[in-house]
Amino acid sequence: MLPFLLKSTACLAIFLAFYKLVLENESMHHFKRFYLLGALLASFIIPNIVFVEYVTVAQSATILNSVTDINDSPRAMVEATDTEWSDILWGIYLLGVVVLALRFFKNLGQIGYRIHKNPKLKQQSITRVLMGQPIPPHTFFSYIFLNKRQYEDRTIPKEVLLHEETHAKQKHSLDVLLIELAQVVLWFNPLIYLLKNSIKLNHEFLADQAVVHSSEDHTQYQNTLLSYLSHDSFETYQSTGIANAINYSSIKKRFTIMKTKTSKTSFILRSLLVLPLTVLLLSGFTQTRQIEIDQTSDQIMAQEENTSQSDLSTYNELAINNQQQSATREEMKEYNALAKKYNNMDPEHMTIKKSEVMRLKVIYGKMSKKQRADAEPFPNFPPPPPAPDATKPPMPPSALKSVKEVKTTAPNVPPAPPVPPKPIEHIKKMVAKGASFTLNGKEITGKEAIEVVQKNQHINIDARESNGKNPIVKLSTDPIVIEN
């Protein structure tokens, strides 16, 4: 927070110094209005701009050692003291914000009360509020506050009325509200008060310029202001801080600016000077963040299509050592699903897909330390299978030509015996033939025989067929003795 405040204050100081030296005494008031508002906004924006620079570095092994600092206890005491001072400073700052905010809303409420309680005359887009107490004219948005008696007696000069109407038509109150809110937040910065005075003074320049252009006699207008503002009845009146009021203390400066005329060439040159000033502030007060890119990781990504299964163990090590900023929520979900899939596999019978392993490595490299701690552990892939025996070199072509081809005839091998049917299939076949069944000498049905064989895989079966009679199948849990 402190570096931001220092940079913001420095930017605002440079903008104000440029305004005082180059722009304030010129009659380019509309340009100055937007310059001052832009200076306020730019002083907040420029310190927050971050330029990202990617730097390629060679990967190196990082060894983390646990070091015990003998000064841990004193450091903890210093940090506790700093925390106490920080809390005190924040408390003072918040107190100032509350006081200025209450003052701001009090002024708004006071203006609203005056508008509600006093008679009003609306003429086109401007409303004139007639007040009983002796006040100098002042404006808030489209409301012009005037002394009722002076207005009815027509003692208020028309130049003064035109001056206030210019404030209303050009909506100078928007600028005042913006700087008042900035003052609430940055009440401790003295430059905010200087900027506020410059903005309000330029509003007077704009209103004076409108009156002078309408009458083209600035001398008469100056005499009218002097005679009207020196009225004794205005000495005890205090205008609200958020209204545009005629200020007697700035009258000398305003008279000087009324006589000033800025040429078109000078206007263009002074306006263009704002560009190099802005570039200078951007180069001096913005942030540059360097992001390191692991060169080894880039090479692996470029060669992943040519990498064989034997490189899986290397990918494991690179995935653990590679460090990026953080992975997205979708990438974390994808990683956890793949890692859980391989972690649940039998290490001795794993089916590994190269594309999925590469994806695991890439996402794991992007993850932060906290993400790695919360995610599924990186799968422990087995080492790749050994390469086939290549110790015996192939026979050269010349040696192959000298070898005679010998035709060998394989001996006659008898065919393999047929695979015996499964017990349950044999029993079902016998049921289809209408066989009779017994279990341990007790007669059972064919359906019961099927259930016995299904439940007992070690049952002993003796099936015999007789001429002209149904087959007899004997089931027994004990060994069956066959009689000759």
Image: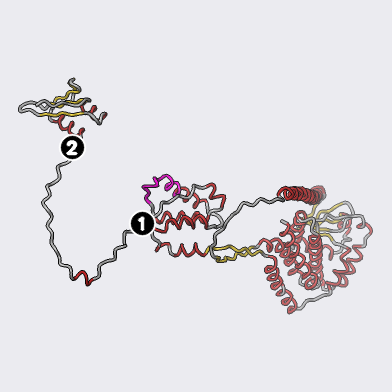
Q: Residue furthest right?
A: 232
Image position of 256 (left or right of 64): right
Up the image or down, 416 lies above or below 64; here it is above
Image position of 162 (left or right of 236): left
Q: In the image, residue 383 lies at what x, y percent?
A: 40, 53
Q: In the image, residue 240 lies at what x, y percent?
A: 83, 54
Give the residue drawn at x 13%, y 27%: 482
Residue position for label 1: 386
Q: In the image, residue 286 lies at what x, y percent?
A: 67, 65
Give the image's coloring scheme: secondary structure
Estimate the spatial distance between the alpha carbons at disc 2 and disc 1, rounded to whole Å.
Answer: 40 Å
Binning the other alpha carbons within 10 Å of mark 1 as few (below 14), some (14 to 19) or many (20 upward) gives few
Up the image or down, 71 lies above or below 5; here it is above
Disc 2 marks which amino acid? Pro
Element class at badge 1: loop
Q: In the image, residue 473 lies at what x, y percent?
A: 15, 27
User: From where the camera sits, is residue 446 visible?
Assistant: no
Residue position for label 2: 421
| Numbered mark located on residue 46 in the image | none
Q: Which residues are the magenta region?
A: 338-351
Up the image or down, 273 lies above or below 123; here it is below
The foreground one among 473 and 191 is: 473
Q: Residue furthest left?
A: 468
In the rendered picture of this protein, how many numbered marks are placed on residues? 2
Report if residue 352 lies within the magenta region. Answer: no
Disc 1 marks which amino acid? Pro
Give the residue drawn at x 92%, y 65%: 227
Image position of 89 (left or right of 319): right
The foreground one among 15 and 148 is: 15
